[in-house]
Image (cartoon, rainbow, N blue to C red):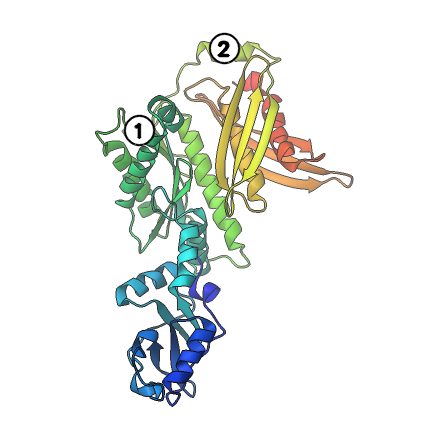
């Protein structure tokens, strides 16, 4: 999340103790503010609120009516902490000081729009942008972080069968349960997108995985009688392996990489025949904390093995921007006999938009594969130039009950980099789909 320095008013108008109330009224009206700091040379000596001067004579010096009790905050304080402090002390403004000198003023009007941007209206949880700010700040301070990523199970079918109101209540239920698992001193929980939640934590690696296990089990075991069937989720975990801060690291890229890896682990765990939790190191723990046993290929899998001409192609692809830094990808794929549509919402600034398209494509591909035990996840997306044209390179991981296979593909960017990203992933899968499944 942003800090006080990012949104404070730095152009501060102030009063001296000898100024009279009439001067204060003129300044407050001119700036349309309800209060001003009082400085004696460079030292903050008080705050004058409009309520302090109501009914007072205009020629009374400010020092006789000002409030001498005030709170200052440092510029690096997170906005949410500043908002909480305003509530605690019952004040609509805070003085921002650095090295004992006033450098700005933060008002409730400054804070509320930022909190609104970073809060999810359905669950009341922070959104992905607030979680990213928190994680980046943790990395900058040299702390180790781990990402715990949860995706609710079968919410789309839940919505179709019971309605979106019930589906929204299920999302709120999971949010409430997850809040009981986290500690605000070490963890940041957010609604990442749609039916996905993420926790960034500074707990040591083993403790972070215990947190993931607790979240997994508590969501599974805490059922609400309002729902016609159990609400569960699948979890992926990644991080907690680095013991010291690396030099020249791009903090945002590091966090994005951890989120992607945790999301991939979640996707792979979803391919298992029962709700599961997948650690970044590759260890799969089911509800019974045992490895999921391989399953015998289904008749559909056998049909795919013998159909060497089976290929998937793009029928439609659309990326629409939501408010702020998120977007929704809608993709439709066809195998020549049937078509499937899939959508995914998530953070999409810069290269993350291509990642979002790749993840949506991988999930759409998984819809054509036998189930359970099969899944595809996008591992890496890279744009390069061969000297004449831009090319998207894609790496994917195909998971079956018997094995895992890493595949690679490419596609020339003709006009649309998003469609080229989806095409590169399909190129990777189509090349060996009939022999690997």
Residue 293: percent from left, percent from top = 36, 22
Give me the residue at 44% from left, 30% from top.
268
Examine the image and state in which quarter residue 172 appears.
Answer: top left
Mark nearer the N terminus (2 vs 1): 1
Q: Is residue 347 above or below residue 435?
A: below
Relative placement, left or right, of 204 versus 309 is left
Quarter of the figure with residue 1: bottom left
Q: CA distance from mark 2 to mark 1?
A: 27 Å
Residue name at image x 58 percent, y 44 percent: 351
Question: Circle 2 is placed at which residue position?
Answer: 302
Q: Secondary structure at mark 1?
A: loop
User: On screen, 215 above or below 375?
Assistant: below
Q: Nearer the viewer, residue 203 or 108?
A: 108
Q: Position of residue 223 (x, y in %)?
A: 23, 32
Disc 1 crowd rating (10 Å Cα; few below 14, some 14-19, many 20+) is few
Which residue corresponds to mark 1?
290
Q: Determine the residue positioned at 29% across, 31% down.
A: 289
């Amino acid at each position: 999340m942003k800090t006080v320095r990012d949104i404070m008013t730095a152009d501060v108008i102030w009063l001296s103790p000898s100024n009279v109330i009439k001067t204060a009224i003129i300044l407050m009206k001119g700036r349309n503010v309800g209060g001003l700091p009082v400085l004696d040379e460079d030292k903050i000596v008080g705050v004058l609120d409009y309520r302090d001067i109501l009914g007072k004579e205009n020629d009374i010096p400010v020092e006789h009516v000002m409030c001498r009790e005030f709170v200052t905050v440092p510029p690096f304080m997170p906005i949410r902490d500043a908002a909480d402090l305003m509530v605690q002390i019952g004040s609509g403004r805070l003085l921002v000081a650095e090295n004992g000198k006033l450098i700005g003023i933060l008002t409730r009007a400054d804070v509320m729009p930022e909190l609104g941007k970073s809060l999810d209206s359905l669950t009341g949880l922070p959104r992905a942008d607030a979680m990213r700010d928190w994680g980046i700040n943790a990395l900058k301070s040299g702390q180790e972080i781990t990402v715990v990523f949860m995706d609710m199970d079968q919410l789309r079918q839940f919505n179709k069968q019971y309605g979106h109101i019930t589906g929204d209540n299920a999302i709120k239920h999971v949010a409430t349960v997850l809040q009981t698992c986290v500690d605000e001193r070490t963890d940041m929980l957010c609604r990442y997108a749609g039916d996905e939640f993420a926790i960034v934590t500074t707990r040591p690696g083993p403790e972070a995985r215990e947190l993931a296990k607790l979240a997994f089990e508590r969501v599974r075991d805490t059922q609400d009688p309002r729902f016609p069937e159990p609400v569960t989720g699948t979890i992926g975990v990644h991080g907690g392996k680095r013991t010291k801060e690396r030099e020249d690291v791009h903090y945002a890229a590091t966090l994005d990489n951890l989120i992607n890896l945790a999301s991939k682990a979640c996707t792979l765990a979803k391919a298992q025949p029962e709700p599961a939790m997948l650690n970044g190191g590759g260890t799969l723990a089911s509800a019974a904390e045992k490895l999921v046993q391989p399953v015998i290929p289904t008749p559909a899998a056998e049909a795919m093995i013998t159909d060497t001409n089976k290929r998937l192609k793009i029928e439609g692809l659309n990326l629409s921007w939501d408010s702020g830094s998120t977007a929704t990808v809608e993709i439709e794929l066809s195998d020549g006999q049937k078509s499937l549509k899939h959508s995914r919402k998530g953070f999409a600034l810069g290269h993350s938009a291509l990642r979002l398209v790749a993840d949506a494509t991988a999930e759409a591909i998984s819809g054509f594969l036998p189930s359970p035990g099969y899944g595809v996840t996008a591992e890496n997306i890279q744009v390069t130039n061969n000297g004449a044209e831009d090319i998207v390179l894609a790496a994917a991981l195909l998971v079956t009950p018997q094995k895992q296979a890493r595949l690679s593909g490419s596609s020339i960017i003709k006009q649309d980099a998003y469609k080229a990203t989806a095409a590169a992933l399909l190129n990777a899968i189509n090349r060996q789909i009939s022999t690997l499944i």
